[in-house]
Image (spheres, rainbow, N blue to C red):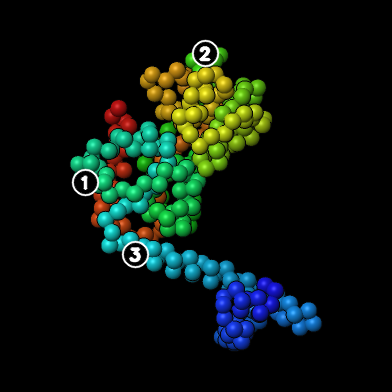
Amino acid sequence: MGSFTEAAKHFNVKQPTVTLAIKRLENSLQTKLVSRDHSQNFLKVTAPGKILYEHATKILNEVHLATVEIDNFSQEKIRFGLPPIIGNLYFPLIVPELNKNNLLQNLVVDESGSEQLTQDLLTGKIDIALLGSFTSIDNSRLAATQITARDFAIISSDKHWLSDVEKVSFSDLKDEKFITLDSKFIHRQVLEHYSNQAGFIPNIIFKTQSISILKRMVEQNSGIALLVGDAVALGDELKSTPLTDNFATKFNISIVTRKNYLLKNQEWELVTQLLKIKDKLHNE
């Protein structure tokens, strides 16, 4: 903060209004929130002022979320986050039931990656998400219910040497070229985790937001990729090779909402159907 004058201009009020507001806060809290250097006409936020700022920011965020949730509560639409991989591989398992229960037409879907969708949940852009993670979701502002965990694998062309092996250690891939999803997807974090554990920096030749582009490039033997093993479908000219490393992790799929978010009736029904994905996978 430079001066009271700058603050007043920023909020389009007169300078005495800002001065009086800060003075009232200081009197109420019985502490200095701003220190003044009259010789240089400069203001500095004190340690108590920084504490107040942090808590005020949280309060304003909660007020914003409350306003958004109240505005949306009377609407039938469900603001739902669905990452591309989960949307392609797992969500279709429950689409018939969603359609039968008249839920499908009420979904407003955000198809960003799990990392971006986490932020969208926190800011109130969406209310429910089906997220992927390679560790348990640990955020004090979110409530998560894990519904299944799937294995990661190395995806390669059926012309690649990996097509001739049943399993592989990640350390054996240090000389390979990698194609990966960008940082909006957890797969980039998983690749970094595996590489750190194996003791090498992967040679990433291409990053993309498109799973289709990634798979197409791997099919052409341009490189290999670390993906959830289910990404390889019948008809793909791809090989999915399991990893043998003891640091191997899982692709965890969880239903996530903001903590204390009040679900509407249709959202409860959506959650009920999402929980059935695990059973659907086991019955395949």
Residue 146 appears at what percent x and percent y? 39, 44
Name the residue carrying label 3: 71
Identify the residue at the far right of this view: 39
Q: Does residue 238 appear in this view?
A: yes
Residue where numbered disc 2 is placed: 159
**In the rendering, at what x and y percent does residue 142 appear?**
44, 55
- Which amino acid type is shown beneath numbered disc 1? Asn
Q: Which residue is mark 1?
A: 102
| Mark 2 Cα shell of 10 Å, populated few (<14), some (14-19), many (≥20) | some
Name the image quarter holding residue 84.
top left
Q: Is residue 211 left or right of residue 88?
A: right
Task: Quote the CA–CA distance across marks 2 and 3.
Answer: 54 Å
Nearer the observer, 18 or 151: 18
| Amino acid at pointer 2 | Lys
Q: Considering the numbered disc 1 on the image, is that residue within a helix, a strand or a loop?
A: loop
On screen, residue 255 versus residue 195, left or right, reads left
Mark 3 and mark 1: span between their CA atoms? 22 Å
Q: Is residue 276 above or below residue 173?
A: below
Q: Earlier in the sequence, mark 3 or mark 1?
A: 3
Compared to residue 59, the image places residue 230 above or below, namely above
Q: Earlier in the sequence, mark 2 or mark 3?
A: 3
Image quarter in which the N terminus is found: bottom right
Q: State the separation of the CA atoms marked 1 and 2.
A: 45 Å
Q: In screen coordinates, is 67 left or right of 208? A: left
Which three-letter amino acid code belongs to the residue tagged 3?
Answer: Asp
Relative to 219, does residue 85 appear above or below in the rendering?
A: below
Quadrant holding the C terminus: top left
Q: Which residue is depicted at the point 47% across and 32% down?
A: 211
Determine if residue 23 is in view.
no
